[in-house]
Amino acid sequence: MTQRTLLGMLTPSSNTTLEPVTTAMIGEIPEASAHFGRFRVTEIALSSQALAQFDDSEILRAAELLSHAKVGSIGWNGTSSGWLGFEADERLCKRITDATGIPACTSVLALNEIFDITGVKRFGLVTPYLDEVQAAIIKNYGSAGYECVSERHLRKQDNFSFSEVGADELRAMVREVAKDKPQAITIFCTNLRGAPLVEELEKEVGIPIYDTISTVVWKSLKQAGADPSRIRNWGSLFRDVD
């Protein structure tokens, strides 16, 4: 039997985008499959109630169950450390690996690694989030040495609603951000259906676009010992970033 590549993905409970998109993305790697564990996330805001959703204990319970499937990587397919601070993801990855013995990664830490590999310091940001969440993301990236030179956001709070943002609206947001000529653009939310648009939009605007579903798939494959470049037609990330 061919050696399988099993990817574990931690999923916000109200997310309906990342599972089908991830599965489609890795479809060109026949031996690879993604396996999902959910925990409660229904809103994105800076209130104490909203922030409490990202308590490590809930995520670690989901990670433990994924470990029973003997996955080669456990990825947090979410962007919460964008507003919580990157150290939240660094701590989470360590705790997952300490508890399960399995390498762990996140959408945001993978994005930051990609920025560093490609030398990106000036980026554009596309999200569905509230003003205060967007501001916190920009501040955290600024503190880490990355300048957000252009941004668009939709001022939404309900996590399920992010999945209902249409392709034309996402295209328009990316085009607006591209006008300020960032070195790269990130579609920063794993419940936006941005990843399927990346290939066409990169050709149109001439700027690399890193969707946060794509970033965690890229890193998860590497951690599991698979070659991300086998994924075609999902953007320059898989072709050009080693």
Image (cartoon, helix red, strand yellow):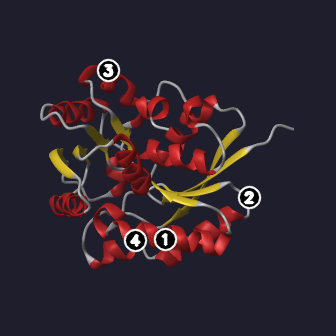
* Residue drawn at 56 percent across, 61 percent down: 104
Q: Label 3 near label 1: C-beta < 8 Å? A: no
Give neighbour class at mark 2: few <14, some 14-19, many 20+ (Cα, 10 Å): some
Describe residue 233's horizontal placement relative to residue 128 as left or right. right
Residue sitting nearer the eye, 15 or 237: 237
Q: Label 1 near label 4: C-beta < 8 Å? A: yes
Q: Label 4 is placed on what type of residue?
A: Ala
Reading the chain from its start, which is encountered first: label 1 or label 3? Answer: 1
Q: Quadrant of residue 47?
A: bottom left
Q: What label sits on residue 70 in the rendered view? A: 2
Reading the chain from its start, which is encountered first: label 2 or label 1? Answer: 2
Q: Label 3 is placed on what type of residue?
A: Lys
Q: Label 1 is placed on what type of residue?
A: Leu
Image position of 146 with respect to 89: above or below: above
* Residue drawn at 79 percent across, 42 percent down: 3
Q: Label 1 near label 2: C-beta < 8 Å? A: no
Q: Secondary structure at mark 2?
A: loop
* Residue drawn at 57 percent across, 49 percent down: 220
Evaluate whether residue 106 shows in this view.
Answer: yes
Reading the chain from its start, which is encountered first: label 3 or label 2? Answer: 2
Q: What label sits on residue 67 in the rendered view? A: none
Q: Secondary structure at mark 4?
A: helix
Q: What label sits on residue 203 in the rendered view? A: 3
Residue, far right: 1
Per the model, the C-alpha gap separating discs 1 and 3 is 36 Å
The quadrant of the picture occupied by the N terminus is top right
Image position of 174 with respect to 76: above or below: above
Residue sitting nearer the eye, 38 or 31: 31
Describe residue 170's horizontal placement relative to residue 189 as left or right. left
